[in-house]
Amino acid sequence: MPRSHIEVEILLRKLEQSLRDAKMWSYSTPPDEDLESKLPFSVDMLSFEQWLQFIFIPKMSELLNSKSILPENVNLLPMAEQGLSTSKNRSGVIEVIKQIDLVFSDQ
């Protein structure tokens, strides 16, 4: 369970910045139908970095803003390593995702 909502908020900001630094941040929103995929990580419609930007960050931010209960575990690293495997500047993004997974782990 996360130690605090503030800690998760800081990590979401770091994730956004790492995506920007890695030139993985998109300035155009995908079509609405692409954001409505039912598959995990929207693999049929979005790249992993798009999923982070347009699905994960907004949903987590919504939970934080409403002071809702946060997920017990997110385990993003395996998908990040696979989904970002061809990205040259992925190390910063991967590092932040490791931190996010750690905050949500039971340790």
Image: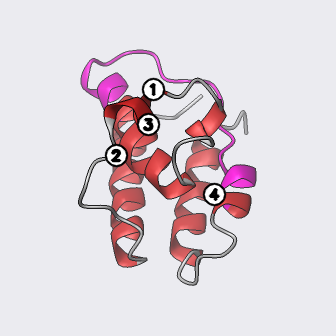
| Sequence-earlier tag: 2 or 4 | 2
Q: CA distance from mark 2 to mark 4?
A: 26 Å
Depth order, front residue of 106/25? 25
Question: Which image quadrant is residue 14 in?
Answer: bottom left
Question: Of discs 3 and 4, which sits in the foreground?
Answer: 3
Residue bearing the label numbered 1: 36
- Point out which mark residue 30 bears: 2
Magenta segment range? Answer: 61-80
Mark 4 residue type = Lys
Question: What element does badge 3 sit on?
Answer: helix
CB contact under 8 Å: marks 3 and 2: yes
Residue bearing the label numbered 3: 34
Q: CA distance from mark 3 to mark 4?
A: 26 Å
CB contact under 8 Å: marks 3 and 1: yes
Left-right relation of 17 to 97? left
Reply yes or no: does residue 19 show up in magenta. Answer: no
Q: Considering only vertical position in the picture, is 66 above or below 40?
A: above
